[in-house]
Image: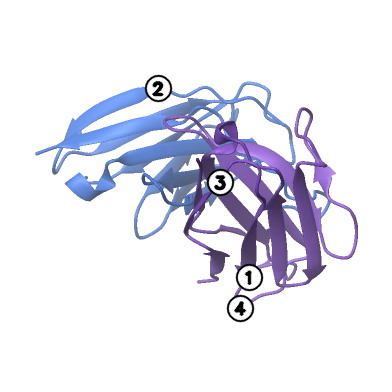
Amino acid sequence: GAVVSQHPSRVICKSGTSVKIECRSLDFQATTMFWYRQFPKKSLMLMATSNEGSKATYEQGVEKDKFLINHASLTLSTLTVTSAHPEDSSFYICSARDEVPSGSIYEQYFGPGTRLTVT
Amino acid sequence: LAKTTQPISMDSYEGQEVNITCSHNNIATNDYITWYQQFPSQGPRFIIQGYKTKVTNEVASLFIPADRKSSTLSLPRVSLSDTAVYYCLVGDSFGSSNTGKLIFGQGTTLQVKP
């Protein structure tokens, strides 16, 4: 099946620094990717929709200046957490939508997630 | 996007069949029903998807009644490795007219005991 990778798988950074997380679709093209955040024992919360070649669409309550999203190619989206604080520590997951349908279905695949710890 | 309601948790024993029911009273005509599985510190994994009646694949079955207001994920003969969180999602996110945004509910934590 289709694979989505994330890099790094886990990262520790100091408070006030920025960290970039990459999401790649390895064997398919994705015009649209999504970024989620998940706190311990909680469900996934959609943060934003990443659109190739255009600005991301953020969900209500998500600070676009803090969570910078760049979708520069059909296989790569990046999420940069700027001026990170301990409360930004979380599990960040991306997903990618295959732009070539399987029948009438546009499949969506999730990455393995990135564990961010801000000290 | 239709709201879904699932049990928060379920317990089972190895070898048993597990049925997890999801209610989605406001499902729309174009909506699909999709189930994902998530293990701790991993991304969700697609299990099964359906629109109506019954769908079966190598890992699960999905039963959808005629009114489509609920669905049941059936896991045959579970093992310890099936301990995970299971999410029911409803929407037309997989169709051509939608961007693909998926909204996750609380999910059902399945604990399989030896």
Confirm whether circles 3 and 1 share one chain.
yes
Q: Which subunit holds the residue at mark 3?
A: A
Which colour denotes chain B? blue
Q: Which subunit holds the residue at mark 2?
A: B
- Rounded to the nearest angstrom, the CA distance separating label 2 from label 4 is 35 Å
Residue matched to label 1: A25
Q: Which chain is purple?
A: A
- Rounded to the nearest angstrom, the CA distance separating label 1 from label 4 is 6 Å
User: SS for tag 1?
Assistant: strand
Which part of the image, by quadrant, shows the C terminus of chain B? top left
- Rounded to the nearest angstrom, the CA distance separating label 3 from label 4 is 34 Å
Corner quadrant of residue B8 = top left
Q: Residue A81 in the image: state x and y as whole percent.
A: 68, 47
**Pointers 1 and 4 in contact (C-beta within 8 Å):** yes
Graded by Cα atoms within 10 Å as few (under 14), some (14 to 19) or many (20 or more), the crowding at tag 4 reads few
Closer to the eye: label 2 or 3: 3
User: SS for tag 2?
Assistant: loop
Q: Residue A16 in the image: state x and y as whole percent.
A: 66, 42
Confirm whether circles 2 and 1 share one chain.
no
Residue matched to label 4: A27
**Pointers 2 and 4 in contact (C-beta within 8 Å):** no
